[in-house]
Amino acid sequence: MLEVATTDFSHTLLSETAAEEVLQVALSRGADFAEIFAEDRRSCAAGFDDQKIEELASGRSRGAGIRVLVGDSTGFAHTADLSPQGLKEAAEVASAAARDGQGQVKQIALTQAFHPNPSDPEILPETVPKAHKVEMLARVDQIARSAGSEISQVSCRYGDSRRQFVVANSDGVYSGDDQVKSSFSVSCVAVGDGGMQTGRESIGHTVGFELFERYDVEDLAEKAATRALTKLKAQPAPSGTMPVVIGQGGGGVLFHEACGHGLEADHIAKNASVFVDRIGEQVASPLVTLIDDGTMTDEWGCYAIDDEGRPAQHTVLIKDGILVDYMWDLIRARQKSRPSSGNGRRQSYQHLPMVRMTNTYISNGSTDPEKIIADTPEGVYVAQLGGGQVNPATGDFVFGMTEAYLIRNGEIAEPLREGNLIGNGPEVLQNIDLLGSDFAMGSPGACGKDGQGVPVGDGTPTLRVTALTVGGTAA
Amino acid sequence: MTTVASTEELLEIGDRIAGWAQDGEEVEVVVSVEGETDVRAYGGEIEAFSSAKSMGAGIRVIANQRQGFAYAGTLDEAVLAETLEEARDNVKFATPDEYLGLAEPDGAEYVSLDLYNSSVLDCAPEQKIQLALDLEQAVLKGDSRIIGVESADYSDSVSSAAIVTTSGIRYGETDTACYISAYSLAHEDDDTQTGFGYSIGRDPQELDVEAAAQDAVHRATRLLGAKKPASQRTQVLLDPWVTAQLLGIIGATLSGEAVIKGRSLFAGRLKQQIATSSITLVDDPTNPDAFTAGEADGEGLATRRNVLIESGQLQKFVHNSYTARRLNTTSTGSAVRGVASTPTAGCQALSLLPGTKSQAELCAMAGDGVLIQSVSGLHSGVNPVSGDFSTGAEGLRIKDGSPAEPLKEFTIASTIQKLLLNISQVGNDLQWLPMRSAGVSLLIDDVTVSGD
């Protein structure tokens, strides 16, 4: 059935006929499943540092990864050679790598599927003159430096990428996606009597060059510079357990670490998550509704289909504190005879897909965010988070604070130096007692798992955790 | 496994592209081919077996004091010609910088390290699979409280790389590496803990399954029943694995790149005391025991042994040819890069000069404190520019000179500057790890532990 054309590029990258032939080779020794993922990625980055455009760098990589399943064993091979011969050789290797099993030789009938992309870039970065891409960088430097004489260094980076891929498998899937992303970041160093401090801002969306019509990079430069300047007056963060108010947007990292990874079905299948066998249970405060949503228009972690050909989904993971579902990729879903939730992702054609988050967020609450701070006599307010890490098996997680303040008598007081906070996922989720009405998505994230990085988004309204351990040095 | 290209073939590709340089242009070509095998065992079966060959080339062009760069994930000649054009085009948009230039031969001898061992290629896939299966079994059998092995992996690689420049550099090398690693799950009385173990080598025969399994078992089981400690200031004893990660951060502050851009804590401190006298920090990629050993740096200059801190005194920053030129000094052979990027200056194989005492003796010396088994959030709570240092941690309390009850869910915090000045002892248990630094036990005074 050919109802809607996939996308223009699919046939040049990997035609249906070529895909069928390769899959037949991959299945020829007997296998339960075979898949080919062909990818063409282009990128462009411009780096400005130390008052110079240091360089413009372009990258291009094309290739295909072939996966063969026999029982619970996966064989995988990849190649940069997209010729029919190159693909067949890789298919042989992948097929030999999956241990000889009892699988049947299958007939494949591919069906084209079209899934609308949640983003529709208006200005393809490849059509934008390079001069335009670098031109704004020098302006950013000037604006940041004009924020204060203590600003001693400014670096900023422009980046765009276009990732086109086709995925076909022995279940008959033949589908593709065209993912265009643009990003920008600026970092400042300020020098004062107490040494150096840094401030950073970044934006990134699954859009084209129109990103820069939606955001004012000068505004970001000023924010980053102000953050570094503010921290020159920062005092060491406190040490110990206390109430912590997490700011809107980037605060979503808290959930990415506290429970996001623990809800990935591969950790669940291996009994390596504190959320095993807890579906239907109250795992969080009733204020918490956690969603993973790959369909969020233009967000950093959105797409039409995942890297296994499943359409992106809006998945409710926790509803009013009750655990509803995990996130699934193809292999983990097959093992449970259920559909994948469209969370099968890979860094590139050189990697095996696994369960990954997309855009993970807490839905909006109802409390005035200012009141959350006013109702907190003493504690810490974290305005900007800087990434984190979790051990899903124990639930212990950390996240960094790159802009934070003491709260004293219900008011934001002195700025704090950087540090990590530590907590246990299931405990922290239960200890959320106030949720703001100011939902926002945060900065673009790069999530690392098992050596692979993928773009993800996070979001949250302002919220309060009654007890978290702040890892500073002040008594 | 697929055989990889010989360095001679890669050098020829480099020669060809560098030969396309036009008048007034400097061209540098880096070419690499890597073959990899990865096996993951789970539940007595092969969960995944990957066999792959990847390749790529990065081309840097400098003309009229401007630099441009492009890379491609292929060695297809037509694509490489386009890539050179792209790099050439990118030159137009950079700011002129009189210090730009490729590395030039400096007469330093390349040390022959013999990092290639054909046994990685000769070893049959079945043997590699067996190593992963054996590792999983050894962990499972190691202790009745081990309830699972989240991953038991065997990985190897054969990498060939070559660099050719119009400035007269031409060098290629091939190395092999392999390792096994396991990640265990232990459970007792409603508490789950995890631990890892590994073994590295250049020949699969060198890999020690039993030792890797024992580490994975021991590290998980000894944490069972861990409690959150009270907040306190105390001595910490870092496990070698943790020290190696700390050295990576200290290394970043000693990069010539950080110095010229005003981002190094230690800029302007040459010849000053920045650490206790027990500290001698060496970056030595010519040591074949280092996992990241190499004969040439990212610009093709011979690598060399650089003493960065001697008896606590800052001796040297690491430089590539650009950062060296900016500071009117010479490259330390410390250009680091991948095929997809231009070189920066960084440490390649850091280690501390070991002391004379074992970890047990350091425990006894400490009397009371905390043994740190692992840390988390090094990317989120450590700022190498300001020096703020705060990480998540787990480990064991040290009581009356011996390791005692397990501790979890706490942080350790200080500043990089203070940590270096508060190191009281370096252990004798130096070990090379699968990273750019070696580990050794380290006793540090006055670190803040944050818990309840």
Image (cartoon, rainbow, N blue to C red):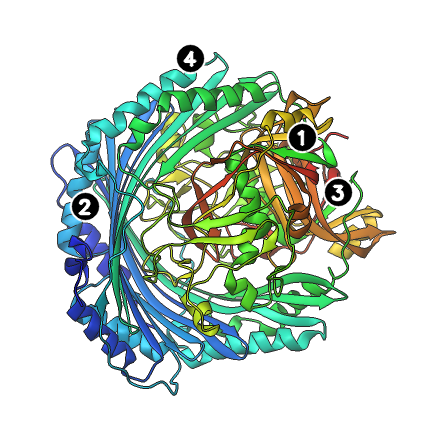
Q: Which mark is residue B451?
A: 3
Return the chain for callout 2.
Answer: B
Labels 3 and 2 touching (C-beta < 8 A): no
Could you tell me if residue B336 is visible in this image? yes
Q: Is label 1 or label 3 in front? A: 1
Labels 2 and 1 touching (C-beta < 8 A): no
Return the chain for callout 3.
Answer: B
Name the amino acid type tagged 4.
Ser
Q: Is label 4 or label 2 in front? A: 4
**Residue B316 image point, x, y percent:** 51, 33
Q: State whether discs 2 and 1 lie on one chain.
A: no
Q: Which residue is mark 2?
A: B83
Q: Which residue is mark 4?
A: A146
How far is disc 4 from disc 3 in space, using C-alphas? Answer: 41 Å
**Residue B311 image point, x, y percent:** 65, 37
A143 left or right, relative to A58: right
Q: Which residue is mark 1?
A: A380
